[in-house]
Every structure is written in structure tokens, then in C-alpha cells.
Amino acid sequence: MSISPPTRLGTTPGKGSAMGLLRLFGIFVWLLLPYVSPYRDRIIGGKECYEKKHPYLALLYRLTSPYCSGILINKNWVLTAAHCCKSGDIVIKLGEHNLEESTGREQMRTSAETILYNTKADAKCECECENDIMLIRLNKPADLTEYVAPIDLGITPPPLGTSCTVMGWGAITSPEETFPAAPQCVNITILETKLCEENYPCIVPENILCAGVPEGGKDSCRGDSGGPLVCDNKLHGVVSLGGDPCAQPELPAVYTNISHYVDWIQEHIGESNKGSSPKHGTLADAS
């Protein structure tokens, strides 16, 4: 089974106003391209995540095709990227690991409500580059188990240099377009925001985290949209946009900064998300 669009937003490096316009155009082209051409990129430089170490990781489906990831933040709500918004019902699969095997531990839910930042519930789906975050209320609460459990929200940004893990089911080969049956994990580092400001024209610095490795070779990529960036066992980022091709030296990716949106999230989910979930040893699982 392969992941279907939309994907992590993408752009190419460059500076100056003309290049900025080209990069902005490129981001919207990326949103359209997967509908007429398949994925070619992947989580780069990672390995299979250990089962039971990502009980908060969700897979979003449109009809029968998975297309984005999400993150369970309590038994009623999943968080994802705004550019994963779809009209109509979204199917959410919890407790998923290997797409080719059914264990009986998986749980299927549908979207009862979607909320974009600064918009009304079930607002028209639009590209939300500046506020690439969306809440999905489940039609039925998740049954919490060792395979399905929420993750705590990071309430302050992680310090520069923090090692974090990003994960997802994005494609792992190109151009043959082989997709992993299980999610891939890779460790990357929180970098200075200015490194992303130089390359991505639509971002608002306080809304994002910039993460990667300076030498390249490790990165999230197309197909990983809406997935978690986990630092010290807390959710600090959501996969948003990045370079094309992925994992280029000196071209980190952009992640929605959860700490900037904590008040908004808690306003809608109706509770504090501090200290409510078990700890999971994510950072030990990727290299």
C-alpha cells in the first residue's frame, strides 16, 4: 500500500525576491504535482521505528488511500498539518505499524470535526503555510492501550542543538517508488530559524521550528506530512515543508512549532495536555 497526496510541502533553495517568488510558486506546484505524478522521495537516512514506541502516530486516509500522518494528543483529538485538510470525512487509523499486516490492535475512526487555526470549525480547506496546523476531532474516543496512547505537548521550544525524532510512512526509494510497510524514524537536530527563513518565503519565524542536519542526508520528506517531531518524549513539531530534493546540505526542513499553538490547542480540546501520557523512548530508536 502506498501513500497518496498531499505531501510535505516542498521548495528549492535560493535567495532574493525573484527566487522567493519562484520558491513560493514551487510550494503550490508541489501541492498539485502528486495528483498527476507519484512520490519520489522519503524520510531520508532513517530506519524502521520500533513497534509500541509510537502509539501516538496516526495514519490519515481519504477513501481507501493513506495520504498524511497525524498525532494523537488525547483520546478525542488528532493533530496534523493544515495542508492535509480534505473536504468530507477523513479516516484515521490508530495503532498502525505494518501496513501489510493486521494485528487486531488497530483502531479506525473518522473525522467528526476539523479545525484550522484562526478559522471556524470545518472551514474550507486551504493551504495554510503560515499556520500549518489542524485539529481533527474523532467521531468516537480512542481506546487507549499500549499501542494507542497520546503524547504530551511541548509547551516551550526545544533549545538549539536538541536531538529530535521525525517519523512517517513516506516513500523510501526513487524513482521505483517503493514504500515502507512500517514507519521510518530518523534523528535530526533543532537548528537556527534563520536557516529556514533564508529559503522558505511564506514562514512566520515564531510559528516554526527549523530542523535537520547541516551535512544533509537525514530529513523528513514528501509523504510524511502531518507527522510528529518528538524531542525529549514530547511533541514539539509537525512535518510541514522542506526542500526538493530532500536532505540537502544546509537546507533544513520546516516544522510547525507546537509551543506557539499550545493555548489554541488546549482551548479547543478542552483540557491541559501536560503530563497525561506515558513516556516512550523514541530517541533511542533511530540513528
Image (cartoon, helix red, strand yellow):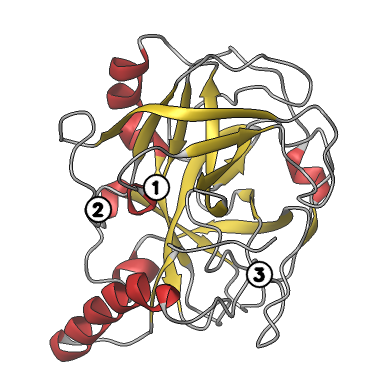
Q: Position of residue 88 (x, y in %)?
A: 33, 41
Q: Nearer the viewer, residue 218 or 108?
A: 108
The answer to whether mark 1 and mark 2 are in CB contact below 8 A is yes
* Residue highlighted by disc 2: 128
Q: Is residue 22 above or below residue 1?
A: below
Q: Quadrant of the N terminus?
A: bottom right
Does residue 194 appear in the picture of this structure?
A: yes
Name the residue that disc number 3 marks.
171
- The quarter of the picture where the C terminus appears is bottom right
Decide which of tag 2 and tag 3 comes sooner along the chain.
2
Inspect the image, locate mark 1, and give the three-letter code of the amino acid beneath it: Ala
CA distance for labels 1 and 2: 8 Å
| Callout 1: SS | loop
Please identify the quarter of the rendering in which residue 47 is found. Answer: bottom right
Closer to the chain start, of discs 1 and 2, is 1
Q: Which mark is residue 200?
A: none
| Residue closer to the observer: 209 or 61 | 61
Mark linked to residue 81: 1
Identity, as a three-letter code, of the amino acid under mark 2: Glu
Label 1 environment density (alpha carbons within 10 Å; few <14, some 14–19, many ≥20) = many
In front: 37, or 204? 37
Residue in the image at 21% along x and 53% along y: 126
User: Eyeballing the image, is 74 above or below 184?
Assistant: above
Question: What amino acid type should be assigned to the residue bearing mark 3?
Answer: Ala
